[in-house]
């Protein structure tokens, strides 16, 4: 699993980022279940996914703040 780059995320629209966040959280839940049941072979996927989610949420929040500050 390859981590998403910031430039890739910034090119996406806000709705696309939101859907990717939801998808990533669903995948994270599945990976956690696999980890608990002992089926997960590479636990580094959890770390990469968690950081991808954090990146996407941060960039989404930045764009929302810029939009709000620009409206003032």
Image (spheres, grey):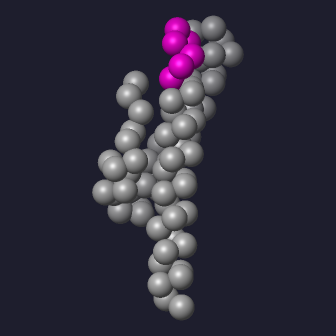
Left or right: 50, with 56 as reference point:
right
Q: How many marks?
A: 0
x, y percent for residue 11: 31, 57
Characterize the magenta stretch by its predominant secondary structure.
Answer: loop
Report the residue at 56% width, 45% height from top: 54
Query: Is 61 in the magenta?
Result: no
43, 6: nearer the viewer: 6
Report the residue at 41% width, 62% height from top: 15
x, y percent for residue 5: 38, 42
Q: Is residue 50 above or below residue 31?
A: below
Report the residue at 57% width, 16% height from top: 43
User: Which region of the structure is painted magenta?
Assistant: 40-45
Q: Is residue 30 in sight in this rendering?
A: no
x, y percent for residue 68: 53, 81
x, y percent for residue 37: 65, 12
The quadrant holding residue 2 is top left
Q: Is residue 40 in sight in this rendering?
A: yes
């Amino acid at each position: 699993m390859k981590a998403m780059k910031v430039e890739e995320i910034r090119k996406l629209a806000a709705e696309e980022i939101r859907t990717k966040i939801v998808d990533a959280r669903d995948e994270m839940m599945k990976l956690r279940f696999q980890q608990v049941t002992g089926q997960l072979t590479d636990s580094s996927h959890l770390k990469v996914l968690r950081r991808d989610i954090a990146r996407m949420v941060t960039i989404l929040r930045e764009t929302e703040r810029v939009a709000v500050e620009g409206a003032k």
